């Protein structure tokens, strides 16, 4: 009996009448419907079986008269299995039991839907506002179907997020919303006692763009990949591939093998540039700018390579539902090989020159330490988890695209600190190069001349669930798609790797020196834009206006003459 | 050890030399297949609105201003250069050019407008009705015909259903003498 059937039988057995249905189009997925009373029981059963919590998805299933739905997804990494449990509640009593008391990583997923759908979670330890801006009016839940996607409630003055009290004996140092050591808007209120960090509260979600709502109301299936790609400025392909995979899984599409290989190549090229970029930023954050300059010099070659392959440095636009748009032919393959050999040579030289430098060791070893147990508890993903001894990688554990045919090592370190993350990410650069070479070999030999995309015949069936994971450079990204009518998904949920990792940052900061704050936050490579993707409209947009050049010049002159 | 590392770090830049380009003094040509600003060939366009209804950024607008004339406006300020329009155009009227230096303080510089002369159907005078939804409307649900070209904003509503008031709003919109900064950016 396969693991999937085992789980299914176990749940049927234990839940009895509370088990409603179990379905799976694919063999690596399991979608289960349960009664809402059984939510906690089911989740704890799954956790006992060794599951890793991924994310929660809330949506309004009004069309079918079902009220509001909450989906929780779990991964069984050892068995390449993803499980989603769904429960429904009525609109007049939108309440679920909270999973957060025993799965701390579910905290944000639930708070998100308190804001966006007006759900209540019984026993949630910290049901504060998470996503919506502070002056968003009470009682308007942007993900509800009757709220238009472009609703702009008037902004209010003098409302502020109420931060928690600092623990006694410590004072608060604010980092953000805009701060020199953060590259995107986010607010950390760091509690310090002298130089030592005693805790921190995070308030983020300041760059919402309402992408998920937009997809559910305005865009169509094949327009979303281009918007998905813009969720993140670093891992665009990750999101477009992930979305496309989720739709393909939901509708049972099988894409050409050549397309899968090309997707794999693009994902690995993205990993190369992301790791090099992070290495540079990490060097910069600890004040070691040689690393920054050299890593970014090497990275530039990758950017130019991507430009010649896809037509743009970053927004590759390669992926559509059903395949890819551009081919990688033999001349392009040669270009890739040439660039990769240069990058590999440069990278080795750089690694040799910096890896024994005491400056790096002193600033990273033992900094941002988190034990393996804590890493499991917070469901950490990606290099941050691998640096803490967790041997997990979605490329190997949940093989997608062409990863079932390439050989590579999953790099794991056990130092549990920033140094471990650094080692893991440097080593992964060489693994990525290995993977691309293998893919190119396959493209040149067996897959010559096969098509790039399939024609999609007929509409995508509505009401199907699709779940997909992709190992982004920063860790596992998860996409959930529920297909809908009108040629667009009814619900599309994106969970970026920073979403779980950021939740663990307060624990990582504990008892470190304030001076190490930038590198600890930087070590998870926080991607605020990815994490914040959901809700609606920035409150400032209502008052937005374009300054003319004259006005700008005037403004800057005034400022200059004043100083 | 420490000194040895520093010496190694010094040799890297001396070996690589200067990598900074003399851009913008020396232009850097885009590689083949680059996706820059899309350019319309008005002699090829048949006004089918395929590009407008598939543009993910909804930045191509079409409207019939009278029986014979259909206007297509491409507003580059919101374009993401994805190249979807060029892919889908049945007449290959759109090319993704190599032009990427598009910064300007006047939106008109990067806007393209085509006025298309449309034939009238000899049998019915007009093949489709404006008010009643027909197959053509369904095909071209968004970014098409009910847009206000001047304000260039997709009509704000969460469903693609057509409301007669919207048509009224855009149909009675008085076109400014000159399309200038004043009419863009705020509304
Ligand atoms: S390139 Fe993309 S965003 Fe720009 S007009 Fe064409 S379809 Fe729209
Ligand atoms: S798709 Fe081509 S032919 Fe049709 S309106 Fe656009 S440019 Fe013209």
Image (cartoon, coloured by chain):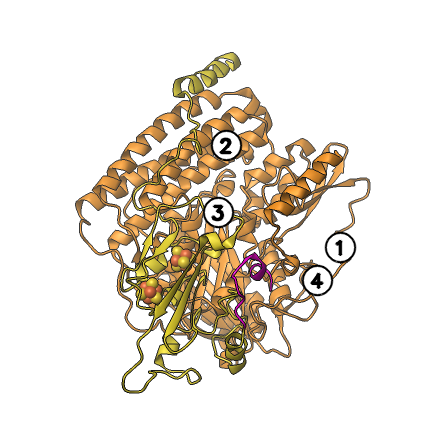
Q: CA distance from mark 4 to mark 1?
A: 18 Å
Task: Please identify which colour was used for chain A in the image.
Answer: orange
Q: Which residue does the numbered mark 2 point to in the structure image? A: A280
Q: Which residue does the numbered mark 1 point to in the structure image? A: A162
Q: Which residues are magenta?
A: B174-187
The extreme right residue here reads A169
Task: Please identify which colour was used for chain B in the image.
Answer: yellow
Crowd around label 1: few <14 · some 14–19 · many ≥20 (10 Å): few
Q: Residue at x 44, y 84 (%)?
A: B131
Crowd around label 4: few <14 · some 14–19 · many ≥20 (10 Å): some
Nearer-N-terminus badge (1/3): 1
Residue placed most toward the observer, A405 or A494: A494
**Could you tell me which quadrant the C terminus of chain A lies in?**
top right
Looking at the picture, how far across and down is residue A422, in whole percent?
Answer: 50, 33
Subunit under mark 4: A
Q: CA distance from mark 3 to mark 4?
A: 28 Å
Residue placed most toward the observer, A561 or B66: B66
Nearer-N-terminus badge (4/1): 4
| Left or right relative to B42: residue A183 | right
Subunit under mark 1: A
Subunit under mark 3: A
Label pair 2/4, CB-CB below 8 angstroms: no
User: Which disc number belongs to residue A233?
Assistant: 3
**Could you tell me which quadrant the N terminus of chain A lies in?**
bottom left
Q: Report helix, strand or loop for mark 4.
A: loop
Residue A365 visible, this orientation? no
Nearer-N-terminus badge (3/2): 3
Label pair 3/2, CB-CB below 8 angstroms: no
- Disc 2 with disc 1 on a shared chain: yes
Subunit under mark 2: A
Looking at the picture, how far across and down is residue A325, in whole percent?
Answer: 30, 54
């Amino acid at each position: 009996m396969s693991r999937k059937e085992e789980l299914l039988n176990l749940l049927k057995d234990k839940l009895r009448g509370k088990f409603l249905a179990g379905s799976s189009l694919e063999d690596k997925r399991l979608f289960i419907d349960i009664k809402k009373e059984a939510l906690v029981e089911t989740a704890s059963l799954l956790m006992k079986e060794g599951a890793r919590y991924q994310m929660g998805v809330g949506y309004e299933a009004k069309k079918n008269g079902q009220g509001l739905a909450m989906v929780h997804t779990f991964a069984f990494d050892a068995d390449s299995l993803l499980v989603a449990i769904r429960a429904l509640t009525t609109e007049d009593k939108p309440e679920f039991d909270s999973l957060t008391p025993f799965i701390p990583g579910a905290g944000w997923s639930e708070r998100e839907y308190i804001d966006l759908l007006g759900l209540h979670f019984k026993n949630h330890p910290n049901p504060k506002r998470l996503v919506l801006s502070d002056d968003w009016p009470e009682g308007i839940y942007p993900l509800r179907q009757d709220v238009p996607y472009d609703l702009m409630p008037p902004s209010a003055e003098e409302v502020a997020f109420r931060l928690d009290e600092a623990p006694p004996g410590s004072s608060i140092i604010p980092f953000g919303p805009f701060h020199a050591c953060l590259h995107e808007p986010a607010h950390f209120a760091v509690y310090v006692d002298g130089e030592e960090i005693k805790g921190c509260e995070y308030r983020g979600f300041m760059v919402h763009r309402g992408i998920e709502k937009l997809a559910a109301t305005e865009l169509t299936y094949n327009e979303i990949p281009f918007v998905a790609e813009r969720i993140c400025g670093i891992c665009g392909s990750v999101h477009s591939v992930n979305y496309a995979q989720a739709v393909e899984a939901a509708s049972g599409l099988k894409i050409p093998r050549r397309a899968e290989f090309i997707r794999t190549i693009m994902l690995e090229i993205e990993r190369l540039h992301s790791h090099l970029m992070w290495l540079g930023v990490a060097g910069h954050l600890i004040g070691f700018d040689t690393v920054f300059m050299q890593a970014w010099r090497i990275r530039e070659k990758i950017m130019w390579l991507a430009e010649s392959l896809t037509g743009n440095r970053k927004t590759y636009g390669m992926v559509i539902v059903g395949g890819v748009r551009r081919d990688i032919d033999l001349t392009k393959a040669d270009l890739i090989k040439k660039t990769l050999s240069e990058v590999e040579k440069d990278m080795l030289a750089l690694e040799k020159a910096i890896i024994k430098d005491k400056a790096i060791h002193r600033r990273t070893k033992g900094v941002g330490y988190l034990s393996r147990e804590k890493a499991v508890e917070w469901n950490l993903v990606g290099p941050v988890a691998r640096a803490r001894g967790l041997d997990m990688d979605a490329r190997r554990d949940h093989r997608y695209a062409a990863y079932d045919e390439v050989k590579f090592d999953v790099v794991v370190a056990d130092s549990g600190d920033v140094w471990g993350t650094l080692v893991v990410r440097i080593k992964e650069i060489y693994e990525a190069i290995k993977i691309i070479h293998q893919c190119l070999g396959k493209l040149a030999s067996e897959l010559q001349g096969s098509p790039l995309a399939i024609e999609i015949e007929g509409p995508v069936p509505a009401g199907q669930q699709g779940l997909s994971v992709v190992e982004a450079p920063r860790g596992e990204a998860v996409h959930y798609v529920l297909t809908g009518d009108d040629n667009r998904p009814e619900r599309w949920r994106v969970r970026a790797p920073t979403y779980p990792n950021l939740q663990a940052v307060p624990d990582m900061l504990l008892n470190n020196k304030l001076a190490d704050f930038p590198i600890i936050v930087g070590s998870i490579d926080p991607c605020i834009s990815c994490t914040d993707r959901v809700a609606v409209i920035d409150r400032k947009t209502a008052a937005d206006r374009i300054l003319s050049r004259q006005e700008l010049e005037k403004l800057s002159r005034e400022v200059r003459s004043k100083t | 050890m420490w000194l040895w590392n520093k010496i190694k770090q010094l040799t890297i830049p001396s070996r690589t030399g200067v990598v900074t380009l003399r851009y913008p003094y020396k232009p850097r040509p885009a590689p083949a297949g680059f996706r820059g600003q899309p350019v319309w060939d008005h002699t090829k366009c048949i006004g089918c609105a395929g590009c407008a209804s598939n543009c993910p950024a909804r930045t191509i607008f079409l409207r019939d201003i009278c029986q014979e004339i259909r206007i297509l406006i491409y507003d580059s300020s919101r374009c993401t250069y994805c190249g979807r329009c060029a892919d889908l155009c049945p007449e290959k009227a759109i090319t993704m050019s190599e032009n990427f230096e598009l910064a300007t303080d006047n939106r008109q510089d990067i806007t393209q407008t085509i006025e298309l002369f449309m034939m009238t159907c000899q049998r019915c005078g007009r093949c489709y009705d404006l008010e009643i939804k027909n197959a053509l409307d369904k095909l071209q649900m968004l970014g098409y015909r009910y847009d206000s070209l001047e304000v260039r904003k997709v009509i704000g509503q969460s469903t693609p259903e057509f409301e007669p008031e919207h048509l009224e709003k855009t149909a009675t919109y008085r076109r400014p003498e000159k399309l200038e900064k004043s009419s863009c950016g705020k509304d």
